[in-house]
Image (cartoon, rainbow, N blue to C red):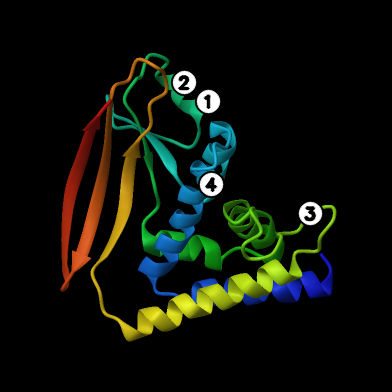
Amino acid sequence: MKIKTQLHTDAVKEALLSLSDMELYNTVHNWLDRISQKCWEAELLDEMQFGLGYELESGETLQSYRNWDELMYAEPDCEDVYFISPSPLKLRRYIDNMDSHSFYHNIIYIAGKAYSDGEMGYPANSFCDGYQFMKNLVASLKKSQSCQDRSERSEIFRIMNQNPNNEQFFQLSEHWRAYSGGKVTDFVLLTYS
């Protein structure tokens, strides 16, 4: 990795880690949501989530699996599958323990895919070094931190979402955890298609 690339990468990592656990968590998951709305291949999005510490959980046995192959080997007929995200603290620890090279190829890659339309500059590719993108990303993260410092608000983060693995699945549910005034509340949102 070039020294200039490493310096920009480290600046993004520092800005991301300067956010509170919840804001860091929400930021990364906002990137994943943006990517999922762009009609990305499900396998690529799954790999990004696995790379962040997500696990699959069988709704039938409640067993956790690190990837689809493990799940399909152990429970080939399982239809009730959930992606379980890591807690905000685990996500922070995971990102904090990344070296510059891993952070660049995982976290900055995810941010680049989330903002691939050029609204923050263009991420690194064969035609662009991505330095302006990383500068803009740092500025955006610092702006998020200053907004966070000015307001004490209730924070909501997703802890689980059901993932249909075949076309016969009709019910989608999302489990949420809300934190407000020192109290944690879990609730479920059910929708039917």
CB-based contact (under 8 Å), mark 1 and mark 2? yes
Pinpoint residue 183: horizontal percent, then vertical percent: 14, 67
Judge the density around disc 2: few (<14), some (14-19), many (≥20) Cα neighbours within 10 Å: few
Judge the density around disc 4: few (<14), some (14-19), many (≥20) Cα neighbours within 10 Å: many
Pinpoint residue 190: horizontal percent, then vertical percent: 21, 36
Q: What amino acid is at disc 1?
A: Asp
Q: Quadrant of residue 56?
A: top left
Pinpoint residue 129: horizontal percent, then vertical percent: 81, 63
Task: Identify the mark nearer the N-term, 3 or 2.
Answer: 2
Residue that badge 2 annotates: 72
Residue that badge 3 annotates: 125
Q: Quadrant of residue 185?
A: bottom left
Task: Identify the mark nearer the N-term, 1 or 4.
Answer: 4
Judge the density around disc 1: few (<14), some (14-19), many (≥20) Cα neighbours within 10 Å: few
156 or 85, which lies in front? 156
Q: Is residue 15 left or right of residue 193?
A: right
Calculate the distance from the C-alpha at mark 3 to the C-alpha at mark 1: 30 Å
CB-based contact (under 8 Å), mark 1 and mark 4? no
| Callout 2: SS | helix
Residue that badge 4 annotates: 35
Q: What amino acid is at disc 3?
A: Asn
Residue that badge 1 annotates: 69
- Mark 3 vs mark 2, foreground winner is 3
Looking at the picture, does residue 22 appear above or below residue 33? below
* Residue at horizontal 85 percent and vertical 55 percent from the top: 127
| Callout 1: SS | helix
Task: Identify the mark nearer the N-term, 4 or 2.
Answer: 4
Calculate the distance from the C-alpha at mark 4 to the C-alpha at mark 3: 17 Å
